[in-house]
Image (tube, coloured by chain):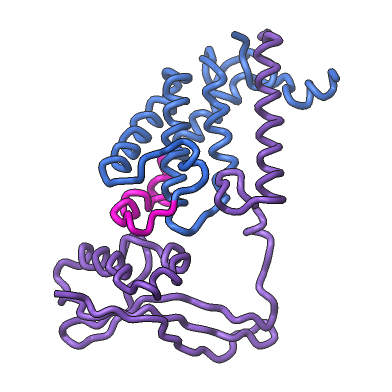
Chain colours: A purple, B blue
Amino acid sequence: MEQRAISRVSLTWRIVVAVLGIGLLLNGSLRMSDDVWPFGPLSQYAFSPPRDATIVITRVEGLLSDGRRIDLPLRVGAAGISRAEIEARIPQITADPALLRSVVDGWTRRHPGAPPLVQVWLVQDETRLVDGRKGPTRLVELTTWPVPR
Amino acid sequence: MKKVIGWFAPVLPEARVAILRSVLYVFVIVDIHLIVRDPIPLSRHPELYQPLLLARILHLPPPSVPLTVTLYVILLIGCVIGTAGRLPRLAGWIVAAAFTWWTAIGMSYGKVDHDHLALVVALWVLPTVGVVNGRWRSRQRFTGATRSG
């Protein structure tokens, strides 16, 4: 089998780039935050919740003009934005509930035949774990926004 | 020293690069539809945009729908060309840059995932290997998945 040669320069820059990449990854893992993506800390995959943790699920509920109160699924396919993005913005949304417009707009665009939304709520289901198993669940209302007509 | 260089650049069959190329460019097409599929809907919400360090260093413009749709089209075309093994360097650099930008946009709305590190690195490495003669059936061996000059 034939073997192709590689020049010293080609070999050198490739090894230098590889070492730099390993350095960036170590730096990201040990010192930095998610901000340095793609070389951020991989520790987000390294933990499990303690046996007495409280599991919080953030949801958006909406009141339709026909009186039904429904869950607006926070998925890209259903609301144009995912739950993780909303969770990351809870402080901004409680300070300015009009940011919930992104969910309202995304849901309305995907449900053109549905009655219009008149009000939305940002809520959380807080489920307590008892010895690692599902315990009682409590509904907490974080903020609400009347949808302007 | 020889041992260290040998660890960074082992002698490997060239066909592996051709196979990895086909697999990864197909996977990128799957990825932008199933995994990081939210950049286009997210780009409708400039009020939620929170650029990563990478975007700030490179002064990347804030995402807009025309921008994300363009990236999507570039990725589709680039991946089809790359999968076919044509223009490995040109298509490879373009897909690497476009996919890095696409994924960075997906991580710029509050929730950052670090599961794409290996894929992003692999996409940047692939174009450093030029044409693989004989593609999947190549009988040639060469140093460290690289090719001289």
Please give the name of the residue rendered at 25% of the width and 83% of the height, measured from the top-left corner: A63
Please give the name of the residue rendered at 60% of the width and 25% of the height, measured from the top-left corner: B16
Residue A138 showing in the rendered view: yes
Is residue B79 found left or right of B129 in the rendered image? left
**Is B43 in the magenta?**
yes
Please give the name of the residue rendered at 20% of the width and 88% of the height, measured from the top-left corner: A67
Residue A1 showing in the rendered view: no
Is residue A18 found left or right of A35 in the rendered image? right
Residue A107 screen position, x and y as percent: 26, 67
Residue A61 screen position, x and y as percent: 33, 79
Q: Quadrant of residue B62?
A: top left
Give the quarter of the figure containing the N terminus of chain B.
Answer: top right
Residue B138 screen position, x and y as percent: 58, 16
B50 or B41: nearer the viewer: B50
A117 or A100: nearer the viewer: A100
Range drawn in magenta: B29-50
Q: Is residue A64 above or below residue B4?
A: below
Give the quarter of the figure containing the C terminus of chain B.
Answer: top right
Please give the name of the residue rendered at 15% of the width and 77% of the height, measured from the top-left corner: A115
Residue A124 screen position, x and y as percent: 45, 80
Labels in figure, total: 0
Is residue A118 found left or right of B82 in the rendered image? left
**Is A96 in the magenta?**
no
Q: Is residue A63 above or below residue B116?
A: below
B127 or A141: nearer the viewer: A141
Q: Is residue B119 above or below residue B78?
A: below
Q: Is residue B73 above or below residue A47?
A: above
